[in-house]
Image: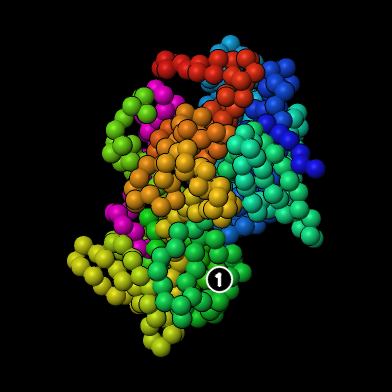
């Protein structure tokens, strides 16, 4: 028999931890009950701990961990007077409480609150998910199929391994995680020399260990720089070139930029024109590099940047290398390398395509309009509660909400605000808070 919940979350990472902590608080205060099921196909916070993909877990976290699962702790904006009580309970899951529990808080503060590793942050997320228990269920398994149940609920099939499949019903579905890596065209014979953002560290063992090789990394953001940092330590004799479409820029993180991440309502983000929103996201999030990581390679002659776009990858040197089609400011060039890594980013809609059978995709597009084959550059219609607009039951995709609702929803910029937006409709339907309550004051 199928289990039922109010909300099913795919992926047990930072967004799931933020939602779980907030649900724990809401239920504990008697504002629920809300039942949440979290489904994870690998391990809790696996990507942060270096257990999934190329990251080792040793990379520095791009934001301060003080921006934890409850940040910015302004729940009164969504929940009115109940918000202060919700935040007080959520503080039990803060980074400070975690460090105190580990008996390391004073040492961290005395050291100047230094940046932490991805692995450290992953352990923090695991700690949160182990303690957020009120109304939270966790399931180890891979979501293999999602359909609509009489147009009112989501039916989610989960492969739990060893031939076991389970079925779960939910009034709303939240998809987290980065999605599926974007492909770029390459000849079949060079497939063994083309890696991507989802490649595991053991895949890169194909790179020679004792001799130098030349690696091209294609992408203009954190994924590309993280790849270079990893391979630079993994294969120290090799040379690396990042092909980025823009002049390399580092994140400024001024007060004003940070405020947009934590409180997009303050500048009325939704009212800005699309060009302004795209430019902000490009220059403060997607198209920038982490300053500490850039500093680490500043005097490394093995690492360089090349401006332009790579459109295709061909075979070179009789199959012993790759040749790129590189569109640079000077025209089209064809540089050759031994290997290439595609770090052009991820596609959440592609992940949805894999989860939803064709008939379900047709039902979704009948409500929301064209999604999967929309023209390039089309803005995905994401509403205030991080949901696909006009879709019932709710399908909430925070990773796609950065352009429509604010840049912090696509990363770690405002996990507490993200959970508020996701959960507000559930409380509104119960009459616990006004569903449209919205405070735009600049406090």
Report the residue at 61% width, 50% height from top: 48
Locate the C terminus by quadrant.
Answer: top left
Residue drawn at x 37%, y 77% as measured from the top left: 314
Residue 307 seen from this side = yes
Q: Height in image: 94 above or below 278?
A: above
Left or right: 105, with 261 as reference point: right
Q: Residue 100 placed where, x, y %?
A: 70, 32
Front-most of residues 438 and 55: 438
| Magenta stretch contains residue 247 | yes
Q: Which residues are magenta?
A: 242-266
- Is the N terminus in the top left, top right, bottom left or bottom right quadrant? top right
On the image, the x and y values in percent for residue 138 come to 74, 41
Q: Residue furthest top?
A: 81
Is residue 409 placed above or below 54 in the rendered structure?
above
Q: Is residue 154 magenta?
A: no
Dot 1 surroundings within 10 Å: few (below 14), some, or many (20 or more)?
A: some
Element at label 1: helix
């Amino acid at each position: 028999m199928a289990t039922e919940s109010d909300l099913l979350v795919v992926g047990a990472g930072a967004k799931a931890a933020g939602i779980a902590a907030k649900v724990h608080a809401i239920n504990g205060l008697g504002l629920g009950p809300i039942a949440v099921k979290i489904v994870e196909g690998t391990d809790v916070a696996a990507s942060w701990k270096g257990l999934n993909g190329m990251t080792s877990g040793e990379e520095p976290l791009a934001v301060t961990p003080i921006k934890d699962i409850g940040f910015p702790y302004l729940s009164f904006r969504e929940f009115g007077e109940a918000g202060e009580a919700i935040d007080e309970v959520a503080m039990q899951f803060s980074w400070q409480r975690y460090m105190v529990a580990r008996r390391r808080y004073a040492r961290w503060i005395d050291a100047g609150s230094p940046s932490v590793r991805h692995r450290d942050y992953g352990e923090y997320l695991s700690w949160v998910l182990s303690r957020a228990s009120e109304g939270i269920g966790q399931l180890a398994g891979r979501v293999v199929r999602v359909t609509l149940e009489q147009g009112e609920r989501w039916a989610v099939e989960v492969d739990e391994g060893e031939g076991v499949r389970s079925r779960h019903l939910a009034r709303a579905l939240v998809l987290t995680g980065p999605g599926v890596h974007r492909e770029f065209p390459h000849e079949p014979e060079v497939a063994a020399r083309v890696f991507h953002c989802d490649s595991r560290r053991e895949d890169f063992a194909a790179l020679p260990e004792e001799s130098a090789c030349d690696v091209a990394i294609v992408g203009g953001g954190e994924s590309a720089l993280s790849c270079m940092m990893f391979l630079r330590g993994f294969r120290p004799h090799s040379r690396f070139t990042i092909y980025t479409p823009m002049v390399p820029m580092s994140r400024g993180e001024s007060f004003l930029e940070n405020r947009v991440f934590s409180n997009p309502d303050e500048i009325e983000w939704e009212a800005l024109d699309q060009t302004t929103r795209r430019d902000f996201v490009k220059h403060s999030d997607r198209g920038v590099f982490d300053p500490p990581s850039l500093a680490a390679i500043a005097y490394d002659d093995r690492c360089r940047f090349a401006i332009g776009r790579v459109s295709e990858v061909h075979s070179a040197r009789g199959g012993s290398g790759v040749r790129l089609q590189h569109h640079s400011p000077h025209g089209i060039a064809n540089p050759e390398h031994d290997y290439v890594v595609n770090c052009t980013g991820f596609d959440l809609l592609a992940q949805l395509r894999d989860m939803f059978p064709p008939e379900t995709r047709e039902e979704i597009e009948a409500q929301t309009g064209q999604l999967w084959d929309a023209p390039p550059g089309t803005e995905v219609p994401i509403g205030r509660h991080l949901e696909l607009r006009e879709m019932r039951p709710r399908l909430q995709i925070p990773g796609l909400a950065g352009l429509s609702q604010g840049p912090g929803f696509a990363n770690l910029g405002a996990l507490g605000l993200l959970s508020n937006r996701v959960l507000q409709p559930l409380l509104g339907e119960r009459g616990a808070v006004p569903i449209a309550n919205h405070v735009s004051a600049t406090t």
